[in-house]
Structure formats: structure tokens, C-alpha cells
Amino acid sequence: MRIKYLKEAVVLELRENVSNAVAFYNSDTPLLEAYFKDRTDWLCDSSLTVESLPELDPEDNGASEAANAVALHKSIVGLSPSQAADERLWTWLARFPLLGTTQFPRLKTT
């Protein structure tokens, strides 16, 4: 699978309009597909590939997060330090292919 990333303007839009996306965060629909369903300008391919993404431990603790980071790094072929620090890549990963293991807490609408 080719790893994708979001365009910088899209990451900024998500950050600035998070209150508008609460309904998407609280649904079981993948956020990016639902939020950008009428747009084609939000996603780009990267040069990175992965055969398959590892199973991640959803526990919210330092040991699990460290183990998850190592497993992801090993699975993404050719990941450079600059790519590893790229918010656009991680925003896509967390909200699309890894959504089942990186579920956001349900957000309050009030």
C-alpha cells in the first residue's frame, strides 16, 4: 500500500475547524472520507510504501506508544527522519488506515 499524506492547507483546516468536525469524530464513518466527500484536493501520495500496517496496542500509556512507534517505523519502508516528523502523514494515518486503533475519545458537542 502506498502511504498518503494530507495537504498542509487541509491539516490547518482540520485544526481550525475541529468544532465543525465533531459529528465526524463521533461517528463510525472514517473522518476524512466523510469530511472531504465532495472534494478532491486534500490528499497526496508519498514515496513511502508499506506491505501491511502492524496491529497496534490501543492502551494509552508510554510503553504501548513506544512499542507502536517502533512497529510502525519498521513497517513503513524508507521512512526518513523528516517524513517521520511530518504532521501531514500522521494526520492521514491516524484518521484513515489506523482509525480502528487510534480512535479519538468521543467529543462533547456542548
Image (spheres, rainbow, N blue to C red):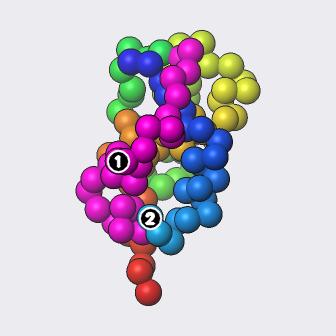
Check the image and report above or below for 97 versus 108.
above
Q: Secondary structure at mark 2?
A: helix
Choose between 9 and 92: the one closer to the eye. Answer: 9
User: How many discs mark residues in the rendered view?
Assistant: 2
Choose between 84 and 96: the one closer to the eye. Answer: 96
Report which residue position mark 2 lands on.
21
Q: Residue furthest left?
A: 28
Where the C terminus falls, by quadrant? bottom left
Q: Which residues are magenta?
A: 22-48
Check the image and report above or below for 45 versus 91.
above
Choose between 36 and 78: the one closer to the eye. Answer: 36
Earlier-in-chain disc, 2 versus 1: 2
In this rendering, does residue 16 appear at all? yes
Residue drawn at x 69%, y 34% is: 85
Q: Residues within 10 Å of mark 1 (few under 14, many from 20)?
A: few
Q: Position of residue 67 (x, y in %)?
A: 51, 35
Q: Position of residue 31 (x, y in %)?
A: 38, 52
Query: Horizontally, is 98 left or right of 48 in the view?
Result: left
Quadrant assignment, res 69 = top right
Q: Residues within 10 Å of mark 2 (few under 14, many from 20)?
A: some
Report which residue position mark 1 lands on.
37
